[in-house]
Amino acid sequence: MTNPLKIAIAGLGTVGVGVIKILQEHRNMIAARTGRVIEITAVSASNRSRDRGIDISGYDWVDNVLDFANRDDVEIVVELIGGSDGVARELAQKSLASGKSFVTANKALIAHHGAELAQNAQDNDVALGFEGAVAGGIPILKSIGEGLAANKLTKVYGILNGTTNYILTQMEAKGKDYGEILEETKLLGYLEADPSLDLDGIDAGHKLAILSSVAFGVKTNFDNVYMEGIRRIKLVDIEYARELGYRIKLLGISSLSEAGLEQRVHPCMVPKTAPIAIVDDGFNAIVVDGDYIDRTFYEGRGAGEGPTASAVVADIIDIARGHTGPAFFVPPSEMLDAKAISISDRVGPYYIRLHVEEQPGVIADITAALRDEDVSLHIMLQKGSEQDGTVYVVMVTHDTHEKRIMNALSQIDSLSSVIDKPLAIRIENL
Ligand code: HSE
């Protein structure tokens, strides 16, 4: 057995504790698999005295995490603090610059600064690992970057946020509206400290930007990810989706073509028989299409102590084995600047839900707006009348340009008979 691999851990929240548990419990097994004992030399967190249910008395406690970068007895710095900037970014820059490998589960950090950090890692001949940043326990980055490396990949999409998948699943299962299920989900502690990261699709956007880079060898470009969350989905949409043969899922979709790179996160209606449609609750799932593999499908727990810690430790194990290739599986100098395709260029079918006054002429006004934008209807439903003299009108269009749908909806929104802002959900026949 060669010399131990010494690591320092910054952040002892859920994932940090999980990493320590795995390294303590599987110490001998990992040593046998890698030929090196993984030794934790130092740890740091905001609160020293909190009972975390693990024994950390054998590790040096460090008040300032940035000190990790200067220690000779640290070969890998493991960052589990979070945040795209601030101390996490500074720790990454300083650690890499002082010749230490850096492992993180920080999706925001990598989505915003991945290209720069990958370059820093290469310049200093050390590793940068972030398997834990995308889809928790699903080893999706290694699967794409190593297992599918022989393929030209064309499309990657999936359920990348467990919290919103849980909310949508529970709305359908319990027949309750969004607000009620959101409150229940908050009580379970599932939401990020800033709930907007989950609810507005930002967390999924971070993960999608990373996935795009690994899948297509493009520079990480979070600014070009279109994001729309689940806040406007009502129970009525979920019920109509079921009736129309669909389920609603918040998907991240990325594809690279001659036209450029498309990256978008938004609620989708997917055929209820599609494998991704039956991935429920807190689970994540990812589909990868490539020229020689056709299609591959991955499912697993996307968050939580065990799954995310498993991915973080896998990166440490890679380094222990000496497997330290480029962070995005392609040298930084080879990463492409892909032209961004705007969401307004999407073409496909749309589900439209309108909440309107039950009065003569409403449908004529709505269909006139659709006609003016050349939008052709496939299905139109209006069931009964609400007690309060209002009604939901639901339509499914044929393939249409996003721009035309949005123009028509803004015209419809200005009608006095329309009560709520119209909602469009993109239908993806995956
Ligand atoms: N908030 C994230 C989710 C946690 O719900 O998937 C894992 O990244």
Image (cartoon, rainbow, N blue to C red):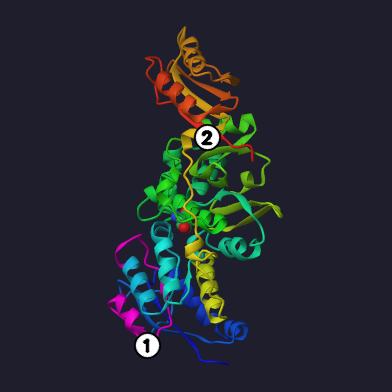
The magenta segment is: 58-87
**Mark 1 neighbour class, 10 Å CA radius: few under 14, some 14 to 19, many 20 or more:** few
Amino acid at the residue labelled 1 = Asp
Provide residue 309's location: percent of width, then percent of height.
Answer: 50, 69
Note whether 49 is above or below 306 in the view shown: below
Please name whichever residue, 29 or 185, is drawn nearer the observer in this view of the structure.
Answer: 29
Front in this rendered view, residue 230 or 343: 343
- Quarter placement of the N terminus: bottom right
Badge 2 is on which residue?
A: 346
Asked if the residues shown at circle 2 and circle 1 are in contact, with their CB atoms under 8 angstroms apart, the answer is no
Q: Residues within 10 Å of mark 2 (few under 14, many from 20)?
A: some
Residue 72 — which label? 1
Residue furthest out toward the left: 64
Which residue is found at the position 49% from the left and 41% from the top? 341
**Three-letter amino acid code at disc 2?**
Arg
Which quadrant of the structure image shows residue 426? top right
